Each structure stands twice: as C-alpha cells, then as structure tokens.
Amino acid sequence: MSSNSEGDVLLNSFFIGINIENILYGIELFLYFKTLRLLLRDKGAYKKDNLFYAVFSSLMMLSVTVWISTQAIFGENMWVLDYGFPGGPFVYWSTKIGVWYMTLAMIVVIILQLMTDALMIHRCRIIWNSYRVVVVPIVLWLATLTLGILVAWSTSAPASSFHSGIATQISLAYWSVSVFLNTTLTSMICWRVLRHGRKVQERIGKEYASLYFAVATIVVESVLPYTLSGIAFLVTFGAGTPTAAVFLCVYFMFMCISPQMLIFRVAAGKAWDNETFSRPGSTIKFSPEDSSQTGSNGPPAAVGQESISRQCRTSVLDGHGKVRFSEV
C-alpha cells in the first residue's frame, strides 16, 4: 500500500472512529445518569458502597470526556483550522499527534484502563469468592501499571507518540499485557458462571438455570465487549494496519461503557454478591399427608407428625441477583 493510500485509510479510519465515539459517548451518558439516580436514591445499608460506585463512575465519565474532547479538538485543528497545513491532513496527523493535549488524553486513558481492570479483578474475586484466584491477575495488573508509566514517559517526549519510535514497542507490550489480563478475567468469570449454571440445571432443573445462561448476564458480568474490542484493537495495532484507529476508538469507549453497565447492574440489585455462589443452601420441609389423603390401606397420619426434610445445596438466582428456593 502506498503512503498516500495508507494515509487516506488512516484519516478515514480516524474520522469514522470519532463518529462512533460520539454515538457510544451518548450511551455512556445515559448509563451514567441512570446509575447515579439508582445509587444516590438508596440510603440504606449499602450507602458506602453506593458512594464508592458513584465516585468511580464519575471518574470514568470524566476520563472518557477528556478523551472525547481532545479527539474533537485535534480533528477540528487538522481538518478545519489548519486545513492549509503543508503536506495536508496526513502530514499534520503524523507530526502533531504527539501534541501535549493528546499526550494528556493518553495518560487519562491509561488511568481509566487501570481502574477498569481493577474493577474486573474485584468482580472476579466476588464471583469466585476467593482471593487465591486473583493472584495472577493482580500480578498482571501491576505489570500493566509499570508499562503504563513507561508509555506515559515515552509519549511525553517532544515530537513523539505511541504511534512511532520506541513508544510503539512499549505501547504494544502494554496493550498486549492489558488485553491478556482482560481475556483471562473474562474467561474466569464466564467459566464460573456457566459451571455453576450447569450444576443448578443438573440438581434442580432448567427453569432455575436459565438465568445463568442468559446472554445479557454473561456479557455484562464478564465485561465481554471491553475484552473483545481490546482483542480487535491489539490485532490491528500489532499488524500496523491503519484501521487500528477505528478499533482504538471503540476499545477506549467500551473501556468505560462495559464497567458502567456492570455498576448499573450492581445499583439495580441484579449483580452477584459474595454469597451468590457460596450459600450452603436451605432446608425445605414437607408435612406428611393426613389420613384423608392416603390410601385406604395406609396408616393414619396425625397433624404435627414427624416432617420429611430435604437439603438443597444449590443456590439459585432470582431477578435481583439474590438466592431463592422454591417449595414443590
């Protein structure tokens, strides 16, 4: 591909990416205010947790707003204000992409990614109800923190960006570790949910297991769109294709939208808590039938006679993420 053709593809990808970002930003705004409404409305026992999620959501919203704003400013300068730049928009993009506000935006995105990954680790620990399973993810998170600092340092140098020079290699390593962390956490969460769903199906029936196999449940709880968009971006960025600009924009937006959907689920009381997978069960007691309900040859049974009990050890989720048991 010639340089002119590659430049055209890159600029078109950048333009398409900005428009997709604007659409996804509207979705994020809707989710953010709906989540805040639910979080601030509840003044009960979960007030501290709600405050944490409200602050967390606000920081994510601020971060993605900074990214959207800098993208808009850079696009306006390239296509409108500096339209007559020598060499055209592609040369402008190549020489100005490392401008200070774009570097600031990249640092903000790195912070956003670290926040999102930390939330995923927290949710994975809750779903597994174990600290041991998140030891490796925490090590990977610390690796992304170190690489993120190196990316911020390498892109802050004059006339540099994560699209060129040594910053490209550091950025590729950073995104690779981060996407691998996302994939690992998503796989762990999905496996845990599906495995528990199969147990419920075997012991109780398909009626109660259907919630575990619901697509929306798996997608939101595992932050699947964030992981899939990250894989798409990493593949195109690693291959050096200009279309990586589109997947970059989508990836950065789902970095905020996916955890926001999860927090909204928490605020609505539908997310799984520490006890969802670990409750020991409840005992369901059945009273014996009286003599009028037994056969003529059966012995009479008095009310209050010894009850028959059955232990149910499989927890089942209702629509609000709580465990319930139904009597037969």
Image (spheres, grey):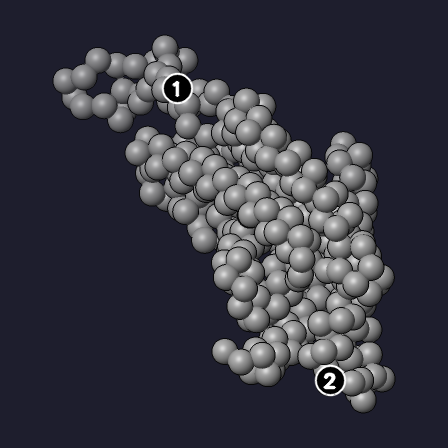
Residue type at tag 2? Gly
Q: Horizontal and vertical percent for residue 26?
A: 71, 68
User: In front: 216, or 148?
Assistant: 148
* Mark 2 surroundings within 10 Å by alpha-carbon count, few (fewer than 14), some (14 through 19), many (20 or more): few
Residue that extends furthest to the bottom in the rendered view of this protein? 84
- Give the image location of residue 127, x and y in percent: 54, 33
Q: Earlier in the sequence, mark 1 or mark 2?
A: 2
Residue drawn 61% across the image and 75% down it: 10
Q: Residues within 10 Å of mark 1 (few under 14, many from 20)?
A: few
**What residue did someone put label 2 on?**
87
User: Relative to 93, does residue 123 appear above or below in the rendering?
Assistant: above
Secondary structure found at label 2: loop
Image depth: mark 1 or mark 2 in front: 2
Q: Nearer the viewer, residue 198 or 13?
A: 13
Above-or-below relation of 284 to 55: above
Q: Residue furthest left?
A: 297
Residue on which disc 1 sits: 311
> At 85% from the left edge and 84% from the top edge, which residue is drawn?
81
Tally the marks.
Answer: 2
Asked if 42 appears above or below 84 in the picture, the reply is above
Quadrant (top left/top right/bottom left/bottom right) for the C terminus: top left
Q: Is residue 262 shown left or right of residue 101?
A: left
Report the residue at 14% width, 18% height from top: 297
Quadrant of the rendered image containing residue 94: bottom right
Q: Mark 1 belongs to which amino acid?
A: Gln
Nearer to me, 154 or 112: 154
